Image (cartoon, rainbow, N blue to C red):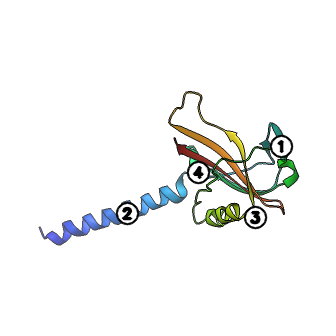
Amino acid sequence: MNGKWLVGLFVGFAVIFGIGMYYAQLYAFYEETEADSITVAGREVAVSDWRGIDADTSPNKLRACLTVDPADFADAPPAPNPQPLVAPGWFDCFDARAIAADLDSGAATAYLLADETQADAVDYEILRMIAVYPDGRAFLWRHYRES
């Protein structure tokens, strides 16, 4: 048997496996979400223009782009060390780098919507955060952080 066959099979398998992994990481587990309200400081707040994604495979996969009334966040606590996480490239309304830059410059304000950390957790936290702009644009994400 010629060694070219064996190498060809190996390379073909590696390419197919690589394509499968790429698809699984960027597309397979995400589901589009819908919402017409979010909980802010213990009360429901109406939202519009919701575009969101999430997955059961990781707490870090939640991302949403939406419109809110910035006045609804007057009683919301500020988010501790907000760091928007990068979304998949195909979810183009959520630009984590631009949001982070706007949070740093003061063009947007980040609020803590919920601490979703399990009661017995000692070495991590899961926080749901939102960045709100004065014009009502808002970007929601969940952040898993190790302590």
Q: Position of residue 103 (x, y in %)?
A: 69, 60
> Residue at label 2?
16
Q: Mark 3 vs mark 2: which is more N-terminal?
A: 2
Q: Which of 133 and 19 is in front in this view?
A: 133
Q: Position of residue 72 (x, y in %)?
A: 86, 48
Residue 24 location, x and y as percent? 48, 55
Q: Which of marks 1 and 4 is nearer the N terminus?
A: 4
Question: For the residues carrying marks 4 and 3, which lies nearer the camera in this image?
Answer: 3
Residue at mark 2 to residue at mark 1: CA–CA distance: 51 Å
Q: Nearer the viewer, residue 82 or 14?
A: 82
Q: What residue type is labelled 3?
A: Ala
Residue 107 circle label:
3
Give the CA distance from mark 4 to mark 3: 25 Å
**C-beta proximity under 8 Å, tags 3 and 2:** no
Mark earlier in primary sequence (4, 3): 4
- Circle 2 crowding by C-alpha within 10 Å: few under 14, some 14–19, many from 20: few
- Does the residue at mark 4 contact the one at mark 2 (Cβ under 8 Å)? no
Q: How far apart are marks 3 and 2 (CA)?
A: 44 Å
The amino acid sitting under disc 4 is: Lys
The residue mark sitting in front, 1 or 4, is: 1
Dot 3: what SS?
A: loop
